[in-house]
Image (cartoon, rainbow, N blue to C red):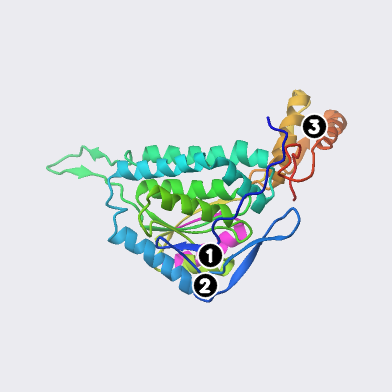
Amino acid sequence: MSTATVAPPKIRQTNMFIGGKWVESRSGKRFSTINPVNEQMIAEVPEADAADVDAAVKAARTAFDSGPWSRMDARDRGRLINKLADLMEANLNELAALETLDNGKPFSDAKAADLPLAIDCLRYYAGWADKLTGDTIPIRGNYFCYTRREPVGVAGQIIPWNFPILMAAWKWGPALAAGCTVVMKPAEQTPLTCLRMAELAQEAGFPEGVINVVTGYGDTGAAIVRHPGVDKIAFTGHYETAQKIMVDAAKTLKRITFELGGKSPNVVFADADLDAAVAGAEFGLFFNQGQCCCAGSRLFVEQSVHDKFVEKIVARAKTRQLGDPFDPKTTQGPQ
């Protein structure tokens, strides 16, 4: 393992991606994405409003309704998703560094966990592209009964800041494999890796309008949810935002899927392997600075081993190294 500090990456793209083109917001407004380590501005990106969202949805709608994507041979869709995964792998160090710069997590974590998982996710769904088949069902009478799976249409996707590139892969993979087109809003705190992924998707050869990325705040996400041209919403984030999405999505009968926080306690009994329990609990709490939907942010420990457990986990926590996330010795980024 290298002990050299990694250099921050060059910022390649700071505009939105709509209909296969890199564009400013209609209003000309931009906002800053901030390095959480030093609170310095990294770059400015467009602040999309309802007009920008409308342009993105229309591009996605055209690509789905009359463009090549939903009619493309499923194997060819799978090949394009695999090609995107290949390009991400070829640019792994750059993407991991960009994730670290924008999010603040240690580069070693982004490189060893986030990027490989995102790439594997896309490859997994690429394999599903030509396997989404229906069934022929035997029934009584002179009838032919079958099911057919069809893409939903335009998928609006809103992702958080804790695992930006992995969340983008989780949302793009199944939607693209099924033949949907997407309009994604990355978190306003961490838009840069999603924009770079869109650039790689363009390089891979995805048709115009299949993937669209709009940057902005909550109002931008709300415009996606309310747009009548969007058929489905996929959201990862806080339950209070999900409640608002449910209300707005119901007005146009959109399908919705949510991934919300589910933090629960680790439970440790007296007969547990205490060292293993301490290691697992420490990882469950501190991985990704605790900024994880399933972080073990509470501990229930049987009284007879409580003091020993606390002593061990405090000692282990003190070994975590705070510092520059590009320094390989750093194990803990900013909270």
Confirm whether residue 229 shows in the render: no
| Residue occupying image coordinates x 58% and y 45% | 94
Of the numbered discs 3 and 1, the one sitting upstream in the chain is 1
Of the numbered discs 2 and 3, the one sitting upstream in the chain is 2
Callout 3 secondary element? loop
Name the mark on residue 302.
3
Q: Is residue 319 left or right of residue 98?
A: right
Name which residue type carries label 3. Answer: Glu
User: In the rendered structure, which segment of residues is drawn in magenta?
Assistant: 233-252
Judged by depth in the image, the label closer to the viewer, 2 or 3, is 2
In the image shown, does 199 or 161 lie closer to the viewer? Answer: 199
Name the mark on residue 49.
2
Of the numbered discs 1 and 2, the one sitting upstream in the chain is 2
Callout 2 secondary element? loop
Name which residue type carries label 2. Answer: Asp
Name the mark on residue 221.
1
Q: Does 8 appear in magenta? A: no
Give the crowd class for mark 2: few <14, some 14-19, many >=20 residues within 10 Å. Answer: many
In the image shown, does 135 or 56 lie closer to the viewer? Answer: 56
Determine the image quadrant of residue 111.
top right
Give the crowd class for mark 3: few <14, some 14-19, many >=20 residues within 10 Å. Answer: some
Q: Is residue 228 left or right of residue 247?
A: left
Distance from disc 1 to disc 2, alpha carbons, whole Å, reads 9 Å
- The quadrant of the rendering that contains the N terminus is top right
Q: How many marks?
A: 3
Query: Residue 36 placed where, x, y %?
Result: 72, 55
Name which residue type carries label 1. Answer: Gly
